[in-house]
Image (cartoon, rainbow, N blue to C red):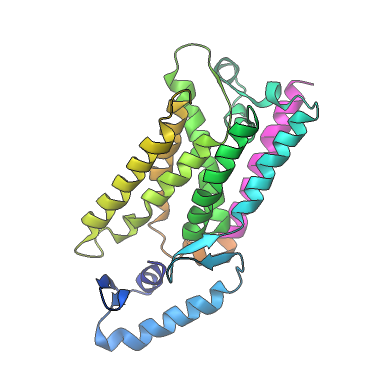
């Protein structure tokens, strides 16, 4: 899949093919074979700059171990809250407060958890899904996209609940990662004769996993659904730029923007409650 993105960025149109004897591979015109090999080799050389992005299970299937930093970050917020710092009152997703202009709660609530079980559940599932999303879209790009999807989930919660409603947790962000992964095959649209089949399979698989993880009783279903849908929309947009994961400048800028979206909302939240 990654190699097909590389070739598509070079104007080639490979077909993704599966053989019982040889496994997955790419089919390109014979006169483009050397060009395709050179492009893939260059991609592999450039990809060495990202040592935390590793192939797992099969060639081209990347997992970004930088998602461990996200797990440490949500753990840090939980530790700070347990040490007597009143982060919950300042940052919880309070629909009434958001209606009165405290928009930053859409973002700050992503870093708060009710208890250790809540934290552990989001951390374990999020580590896997975020690592895969960052492996697909790039370290900085995938992280920023997941954060925006999570904020979109909280926005959906604010819009859909008619009365006062409080919520917290990174589950909207985790469901956003699931949406990003479900949309990763959108780049095939109009590129291969079997694009519709691959897109339908990817989205259907994502929906089934959403039903399994996102509709558990006692959870904020609106935030989960909103995060998943936002992930689908953002993923479909990012899939139009097949070489984005290898764009170091774009990933660096997205990483800076993500850092800003963590620090600035919390500065506003703590200032408002001071």
In the displayed structure, 210 sits above or below 25; it is: above
Front residue of this view, candidates 239 and 27: 27
Which residue is depicted at the point 46% across and 59% down? 136
Residue 42 x, y percent position in the rendering: 49, 80
Residue 137 x, y percent position in the rendering: 48, 57
The stretch of residues the image draws in magenta is 251-274
Residue 109 x, y percent position in the rendering: 61, 30
In the displayed structure, 37 sits above or below 153; it is: below
Residue 88 lies left or right of residue 213; in this view the side is: right
Question: Is residue 234 in view?
Answer: no
Which residue is depicted at the point 61% across and 27% down? 105
Which residue is depicted at the point 42% across and 69% down? 58
Which residue is depicted at the point 48% across and 22% down? 218
Magenta stretch holds residue 271? yes
Task: Report the residue that reaches farthest toward the top.
Answer: 163
Task: Report the residue that reaches farthest toward the left.
Answer: 193
In the displayed structure, 85 sits above or below 130; it is: above
Residue 62 lies left or right of residue 4; in this view the side is: right
């Amino acid at each position: 899949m990654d190699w097909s993105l590389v070739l598509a960025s070079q104007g080639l149109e490979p077909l993704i093919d599966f053989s019982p004897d040889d496994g997955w591979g790419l089919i390109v015109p014979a006169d483009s074979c050397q060009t395709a090999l050179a492009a893939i080799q260059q991609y592999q050389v450039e990809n060495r700059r990202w040592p935390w992005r590793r192939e797992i299970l099969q060639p081209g299937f990347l997992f970004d171990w930088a998602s461990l930093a996200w797990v440490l970050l949500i753990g840090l917020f939980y530790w700070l809250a347990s040490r007597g710092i009143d982060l919950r009152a300042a940052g919880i997703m309070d629909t009434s407060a958001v209606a009165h202009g405290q928009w930053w709660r859409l973002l700050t609530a992503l870093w708060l958890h009710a208890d250790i079980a809540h934290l552990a559940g989001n951390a374990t599932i999020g580590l896997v899904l975020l690592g895969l999303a960052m492996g697909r879209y790039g370290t900085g790009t995938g992280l920023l996209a997941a954060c925006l999807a999570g904020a979109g989930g909280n926005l959906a919660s604010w819009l859909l609940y008619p009365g006062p409603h409080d919520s917290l947790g990174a589950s909207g962000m985790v469901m956003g990662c699931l949406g990003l992964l479900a949309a990763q095959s959108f780049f095939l649209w109009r590129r291969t004769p079997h694009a519709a089949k691959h897109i339908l399979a990817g989205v259907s698989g994502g929906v089934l996993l959403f039903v399994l993880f996102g509709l558990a009783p006692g959870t904020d279903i609106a935030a989960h659904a909103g995060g998943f849908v936002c992930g689908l929309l953002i993923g479909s947009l990012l899939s139009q730029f097949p070489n984005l994961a290898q764009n170091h400048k774009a990933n660096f800028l997205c990483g800076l923007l993500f850092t800003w979206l963590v620090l600035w909302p919390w500065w506003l939240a703590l200032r408002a409650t001071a």
